[in-house]
Structures are given as structure tokens and as C-alpha cells.
């Protein structure tokens, strides 16, 4: 028995097992909270459009339609999975899984309150950027594997669009990194403590240098790029129903479609969280005297506010044409954000904030 | 212990997916295996303590370069059977290249560990005092700033060259001029005509 124990080396295994169990439990708890709040955010999304269009929105299932998302969930799960003839079966089913899983693992580095983060990476923001750049695969593989023209066109559009807008998102992230002097998400949030004037959107702590002249436009560009990156209206060309039926997900039904939808909405909420963390002070209260309310509340409130903005944009703005989308990304956002990186870099170098 | 397990999983996934890049029948699947290989290689970088490089590998290669690969390969109309016929005839040459590469790598590895010439470099990938992101920044922007900038210029020239070679100005293409469109008002956009009935406008 003792021989066996040395062979397996239980002593060296114990910490590994303990760490893994703890991590898995944390991740499970986080996922459950995320999914349940997502169900209600989805309902909010639909209610907001309904209100803009002077409809009632979903109001039958549960009080005020509160259980609508769960009803939809059950409906999707109990339907039949149809795989089109001639489709690449494996890839067809892997594609929604990729979208779904990537949407979740991005959340690993998001700090929702002081110390409440699953992985406190010191390249956290790079990790998030990398994961969001992988998101394109779920869509492009799904579109190709469907073996159908409309999904394929949608997938190609989507790939071009996401790759284009990633560039400007990358540069905008660099401006925030330079101001914060760190890639760790928790440090970036900690840097914005003390009141709304310290948030990176305004960055009034840099006065007398008026850095807000750069950071306010950057906030706007980031928000618009986030819309494009998540294929939300007015940039929902990959699934433009008037031209491509429903884009890359034409052939999807039942649970794979559900996975695509959950992944898409999780990415939207992730982008809201990123806007909150990068520009709006993360879990910090706008005024010091309001900080008796727990930090998690502030984080959630800001994320919900940006989600509301996403929904309002969908309700109000007409869809872009494809050449306009590309022009906006490459000819306006890219040069502007590049210029902003130079300006912020110059400020950091000459103010001595870097040293 | 977890490190060792992780290494073996990542390394075997990398090697296996690299094998399938060559073995896959469908070029799109080849590219997807290549992407998996990149991804696991990024995992190996993380294990080495070079997390910034790992993220760069994913952002640049997986997130951008491989997407373009996939883009091109998906739109190609490749005849798979014809492609497969050439496979065996290239096998000896490919094998030779592989053997030479492996021999060189083993040689370098042996020399690296045995000779004391490069001993300090093998000690650690990053200095202990600063995070590897800062160490990398110091090297690129302080010690080797001119080389780094020169490399950037070479890339810029290549990019401009590619654009110049492919750019065509077709005379009859209508382009949108946003400023002009937005600057239109009633005076420039609308003209009033008093049209007599049955005659129409000749314009």
C-alpha cells in the first residue's frame, strides 16, 4: 500500500486536486449566476424594443412575462436537431459549441467586485482581447459547415467585420492600458477609484492636461466598435434578415441555435462589462459617499445600463450598408484610435506617469 | 504535478493536430487543425511563463492570420482527389526536410545545454525583478528600438506595396461622399419646374 502511494505520489497530487476542485466550484457558481441573469437581460432586451415600438413585449409567461426566457429555453431544447444534407456534420455541431464556450471563458478575468475574479491574470485585458478575437471562428465554421450559400455569405461578412473592428478595439484598449500602466483588469479598475472624475472616460486626474478630450471620443468609438464586434444592430449584417435570411445561423435549429444565441448574448454582456471596466470605473461608485452600497451592485448597475444602451441602439438605428461599415471601421475609427494612442503615449511619456 | 500533466496534454495536442494538418482530407479542416496547433502552442508559452507572447500568438495568428487563411481556403474550389495523388510523391522530400530539421534542433539543444557559452540565457526566460511584459517592452523599445522601428517600416512598405499593386480606380464606379451627402440642403437638391401637361421635361 505504501509502495502504491509513493508510486502515485499522493502528496504531490493533493494540492492539484484541491486547486482543481475549488476552481471548478467557483466557475460553476459564476456560470449559474451569469446564465440566470442572462435570462432576465434577454427579457429586458425584448421589453426595451417593445417599449420603443409601443408594444407590450412578452407578457404571458409568468408575472410581466418574467419567465419568458425559460419558456423559450425549454422550447429550443425539446425541438429536433436538424442537420442539413451535405453539411459537415462534426463541424456543424462544433461551431455553436465554440461560440458558447468562448463566450464563457472570456468572463474568467472579469473582476466584478474587489477580489471577485476567477483568474487574476496580469495580462487580463490581452486575454479578453484574444478570446474575443477567437469568437469569429464559431460563426465562420458554422456558416461554412452548413453547406448553403446564405450562411456562407453571412459567415464571410461576419469574419471581415469582426477582424476589421478588432483593430480599432485593440488600439482603444492600448490607450486605457497606457493611462492605467497595467494589463491587469483589477489594477485598471483600482486606478479609477475616488469618484466619477477619475474614471478613464473623463480622466480628470490628468489635469491640467485635458486628456478627456481624447478619452470621451475613445469611449464612444469603443462602444460603437463593441456593437460591430458582437454583430449587433446597426452592424448586424452577418444575419441581415432582409438579404441573408438569418445569415450564418439559417440552418441551425433547436439546441445548437440556442447555444449560438446564448453565446452571442453573453458576448454582448461581456462587452458591456468591458466598457464598464475600461472607461466607467468598474465596481467604483460615482461619488465616495455612495460607496456604502456594495461594489458588486455598482458593477451590475453599470453593466445593465450599457446593456440598455445596446438595446436602445437596436431599437433606434437603421442598419448600415456594408461599404459604410467598412469605411467607418478602416477609414475613421482606425486612424482616430491610432492618433489617440500617440497622444496618450506622448502624455504618459512626458508627464512622467510611466516611471 | 498539474504543470506536468498540462504540459503533456498541451504538447501531445500540438503534435497530434500538427499531424492532422497534413493528414486531413479537407483543406478547411487542415486549417482548423492548424488553429488548434497554434492554440496549444500558446498554452505551452503560458507554461513557460511567457503569457504575453501566448496572448500575442492567439491575437495575431489565431485571431487574424488564420481567419484570412480560412477565408481563402473556404472560397477555393479544390479538387481533393487530384491533390491527394501528389501527396505520396512528395513524401520522401518532405521526410528529408523533417529529418534535417529534427537533427538541427537536437544538435542546437545539446549544444545549448552542454556549452557554457549561452548558459545565462537558459536560466530564465524573464528576469525575476520585472514582469515579462515589462522586460519585453524594455528590450524592444529601449535596447533595440531602431531595429524594432525598422522592422515596422519594412512591414509598412510591404503593406503599401500590396495595396498599390491591387488598387484599381474604375471610372464608372459610384462612390459615396458622405460630406457632400450630408451637406445637401433644399436649395441644391430640389429644383421646381412648371410642367405643362402632356409635354414632360426634357432633361
Image (cartoon, rainbow, N blue to C red):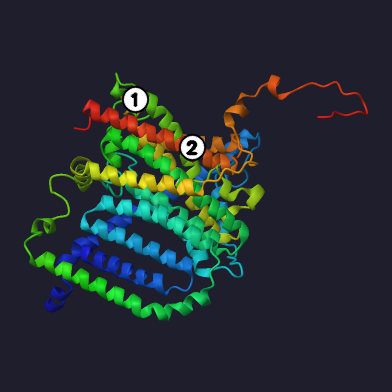
Mark 1 vs mark 2: give the one in front: 2
Residue B4 sits above or below residue A132 on the image: below
Q: In x, y percent, where is residue A151?
A: 59, 57
Q: Are marks 1 and 2 in contact (CB under 8 Å)?
A: no
> Residue shown at 52%/74% (left/top)?
B80
Instruction: Please name whichever residue, B203 or B11, is drawn nearer the observer in this view of the structure.
Output: B203
Residue A283 sits above or below residue A212 on the image: below
> Residue shown at 84%/29% (left/top)?
B202
Q: In x, y percent, where is residue B61?
A: 37, 55
Q: Chain of mark 1?
A: A
> Residue shown at 49%/62% (left/top)?
B73
Q: Quadrant of the C terminus of chain A?
A: top left
| Whether residue A306 is visible | no
Which SS class for mark 1? Answer: loop
Q: Is residue A39 left or right of residue A150?
A: left
What is the C-alpha distance between the residues marked 1 and 2?
23 Å
Q: Is residue A253 left or right of residue A299?
A: right
Question: Could you say which disc has been placed on residue A211 in the image?
Answer: 1
Binning the other alpha carbons within 10 Å of mark 2 as few (below 14), some (14 to 19) or many (20 upward) gives: few
Which residue, given by chain and number where applicable, does mark 2 sit on?
Answer: A331
Of labels 1 and 2, earlier in sequence is: 1
Quadrant assignment, res A269 = top left
Binning the other alpha carbons within 10 Å of mark 1 as few (below 14), some (14 to 19) or many (20 upward) gives: many
Q: Is residue B82 left or right of residue B10?
A: right
Amino acid at each position: 500500500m505504501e509502495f502504491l502511494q509513493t508510486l502515485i505520489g499522493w502528496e504531490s497530487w493533493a494540492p492539484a486536486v484541491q486547486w482543481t476542485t475549488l476552481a471548478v466550484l467557483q466557475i460553476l457558481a459564476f456560470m449559474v449566476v451569469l446564465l440566470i441573469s442572462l435570462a432576465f437581460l434577454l427579457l429586458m432586451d425584448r421589453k426595451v424594443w417593445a417599449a420603443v415600438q409601443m408594444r407590450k413585449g412578452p407578457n404571458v409567461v409568468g408575472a410581466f412575462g418574467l419567465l419568458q426566457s425559460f419558456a423559450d429555453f425549454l422550447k429550443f431544447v425539446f425541438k429536433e436537431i436538424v442537420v442539413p444534407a451535405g453539411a459537415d456534420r462534426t463541424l456543424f455541431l462544433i461551431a455553436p459549441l465554440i461560440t458558447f464556450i468562448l463566450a464563457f471563458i472570456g468572463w474568467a478575468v472579469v473582476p466584478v467586485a474587489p477580489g471577485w475574479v476567477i483568474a487574476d491574470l496580469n495580462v487580463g485585458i490581452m486575454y479578453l482581447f484574444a478570446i474575443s478575437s477567437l469568437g469569429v471562428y464559431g460563426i465562420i465554421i458554422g456558416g461554412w459547415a452548413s453547406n448553403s450559400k446564405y450562411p456562407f455569405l453571412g459567415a464571410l461578412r461576419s469574419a471581415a467585420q469582426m477582424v476589421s473592428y478588432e483593430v480599432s478595439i485593440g488600439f482603444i484598449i492600448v490607450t486605457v492600458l497606457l493611462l492605467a500602466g497595467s494589463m491587469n483588469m483589477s489594477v485598471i479598475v483600482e486606478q479609477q477609484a475616488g469618484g466619477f472624475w477619475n474614471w478613464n472616460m473623463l480622466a480628470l486626474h490628468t489635469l491640467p492636461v485635458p486628456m478627456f478630450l481624447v478619452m470621451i471620443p475613445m469611449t464612444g468609438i469603443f462602444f460603437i466598435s463593441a456593437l460591430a464586434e458582437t454583430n449587433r444592430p446597426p452592424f448586424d449584417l452577418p444575419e441581415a434578415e432582409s438579404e441573408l435570411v438569418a445569415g450564418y445561423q439559417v440552418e441551425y435549429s433547436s439546441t445548437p441555435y440556442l447555444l449560438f444565441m446564448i453565446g452571442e448574448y453573453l458576448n454582448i454582456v461581456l462587452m458591456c462589462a468591458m466598457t464598464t471596466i475600461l472607461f466607467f470605473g468598474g465596481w467604483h461608485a460615482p461619488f465616495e459617499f455612495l460607496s456604502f452600497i456594495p461594489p458588486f451592485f455598482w458593477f451590475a448597475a453599470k453593466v445593465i445600463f450599457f446593456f440598455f444602451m445596446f438595446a436602445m441602439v437596436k431599437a433606434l438605428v437603421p442598419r448600415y450598408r456594408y461599404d459604410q461599415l467598412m469605411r467607418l471601421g478602416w477609414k475613421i475609427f482606425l486612424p482616430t484610435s491610432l492618433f489617440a494612442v500617440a497622444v496618450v503615449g506622448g502624455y504618459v511619456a512626458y508627464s512622467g506617469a510611466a516611471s | 504535478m498539474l504543470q506536468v500533466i498540462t504540459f503533456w496534454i498541451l504538447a501531445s495536442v500540438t503534435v497530434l493536430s500538427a499531424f492532422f494538418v497534413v493528414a486531413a482530407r479537407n483543406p478547411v479542416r487542415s486549417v482548423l487543425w492548424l488553429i488548434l496547433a497554434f492554440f496549444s502552442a500558446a498554452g505551452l508559452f503560458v507554461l513557460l511563463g511567457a503569457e504575453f507572447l501566448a496572448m500575442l500568438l492567439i491575437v495575431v495568428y489565431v485571431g487574424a492570420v488564420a481567419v484570412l487563411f480560412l477565408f481563402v481556403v473556404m472560397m477555393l474550389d479544390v479538387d481533393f482527389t487530384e491533390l491527394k495523388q501528389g501527396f505520396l510523391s512528395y513524401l520522401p522530400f518532405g521526410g528529408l526536410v523533417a529529418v534535417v530539421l529534427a537533427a538541427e534542433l537536437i544538435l542546437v539543444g545539446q549544444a545549448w545545454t552542454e556549452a557554457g557559452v549561452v548558459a545565462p540565457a537558459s536560466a530564465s526566460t524573464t528576469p525575476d525583478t520585472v514582469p515579462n511584459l515589462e522586460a519585453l517592452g524594455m528590450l524592444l523599445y529601449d535596447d533595440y528600438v531602431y531595429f524594432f522601428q525598422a522592422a515596422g517600416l519594412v512591414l509598412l512598405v510591404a503593406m503599401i506595396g500590396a495595396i498599390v499593386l491591387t488598387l484599381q480606380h474604375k471610372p464608372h464606379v459610384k462612390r459615396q461622399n458622405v460630406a457632400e451627402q450630408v451637406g445637401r440642403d433644399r436649395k441644391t437638391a430640389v429644383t421646381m419646374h412648371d410642367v405643362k401637361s402632356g409635354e414632360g421635361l426634357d432633361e
